[in-house]
Image (cartoon, helix red, strand yellow):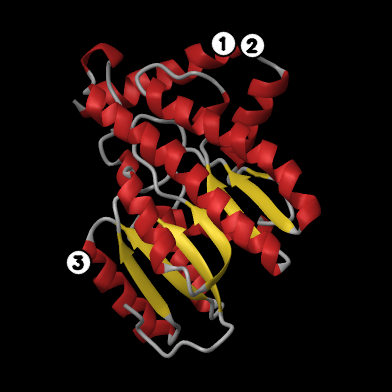
């Protein structure tokens, strides 16, 4: 659904997982810059609510696509419904997390997480990057996580999907940059979104980031930095893990944190 008039030759930003958390914060930030936005999410009612708010508050063109990106049908739906639009900025934000003991997690849900967190960004990125190269350039942003730099107990599947995104995005960034497409990867830590609603963060020595801060910081650095890490604590964790500690120690340290926040929430 288009919420305002569409101008011929208009450029669009496509945001997956756009109705809450960091995805919604991206949408609001870009709407304030008068960017036309394609909102992609599963919840049709929430999509309509968000699109109406953005169109009313910012007077921009909005298109909504209700699709399940963990399925091939959902990915094809997004591709087909944007065929006539000039998408020059893709934000792969949608994600799903599995937390708890690996032995008791639902295998079907873990497979959905892999499909949504990994397969969907690969398919969408290949499609839209081909179009961007043909058009002379564009931007692609991936949402990874600070947990993607090592294995993490109790969220092993989720952390592994984010590790995949980090490596995949870094690889194609080197391929696409000479062709005019800039690729960046954001790796935030704990952020106030639906993904952390199942955790008890009250005993942590630091506060989670706000989605609005993550979105502003990331967009300010998009295209300028390949790896974007919002927040001082997350930068410290990244650099200490990369230069001061072994992967085994990093896994142990992150495991202690998630053992605390997961168990406390039970």
Q: Left or right of 104: which side holds 73?
A: right
For label 1, count other residues whose C-alpha is less than 10 Å away and answer few (under 14), some (14-19) or many (20+): few
User: Looking at the image, is mark 3 or mark 1 nearer the viewer?
Assistant: 3
Secondary structure under the numbered disc 1 in the rendered image = helix
Q: Position of residue 124 (x, y in %)?
A: 49, 51
Residue drawn 31% across and 50% down? 73
Q: Position of residue 140 (x, y in %)?
A: 60, 55
Residue drawn 51% across and 42% down? 122
Marking on residue 249: 1
Q: CA distance from mark 2 to mark 3?
A: 46 Å
Secondary structure under the numbered disc 2 in the rendered image = loop
Q: Which residue is mark 2?
A: 246
Q: Position of residue 236 (x, y in %)?
A: 64, 32
Q: Which residue is mark 3?
A: 45
Pointers 2 and 1 in contact (C-beta within 8 Å): yes
Q: Earlier in the sequence, mark 2 or mark 3?
A: 3
């Amino acid at each position: 659904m288009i919420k305002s008039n569409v101008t011929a030759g208009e450029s669009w930003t496509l945001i997956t997982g756009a109705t809450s958390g960091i995805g919604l914060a991206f949408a609001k930030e870009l709407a304030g810059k008068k960017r036309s936005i394609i909102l992609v999410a599963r919840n049709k009612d929430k999509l309509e609510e968000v699109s109406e708010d953005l169109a009313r508050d910012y007077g921009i063109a909005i298109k909504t696509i209700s699709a399940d990106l963990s399925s091939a049908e959902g990915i094809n739906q997004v591709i087909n419904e944007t065929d006539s639009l000039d998408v020059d900025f893709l934000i792969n934000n949608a994600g799903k997390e599995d937390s708890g003991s690996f032995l008791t997690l639902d295998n079907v849900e873990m497979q959905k997480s892999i499909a949504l967190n990994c397969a969907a960004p690969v398919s969408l990125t290949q499609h839209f990057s081909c179009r961007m190269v043909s058009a002379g350039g564009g931007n692609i942003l991936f949402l990874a996580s600070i947990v993607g730099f090592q294995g993490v107990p109790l969220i092993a599947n989720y952390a592994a999907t984010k590790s995949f995104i980090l490596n995949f995005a870094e690889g194609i960034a080197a391929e696409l940059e000479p062709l005019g497409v800039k690729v960046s990867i954001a790796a935030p830590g704990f952020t106030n979104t639906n993904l952390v609603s199942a955790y008890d963060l009250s005993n942590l020595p630091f506060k989670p980031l706000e989605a609005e801060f993550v979105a502003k910081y990331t967009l300010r650095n998009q295209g300028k930095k390949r790896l974007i890490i919002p927040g001082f604590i997350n930068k410290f964790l990244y650099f200490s893990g990369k230069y001061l500690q072994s992967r085994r120690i990093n896994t142990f340290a992150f495991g202690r944190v998630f053992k605390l926040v997961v168990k406390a929430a039970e």
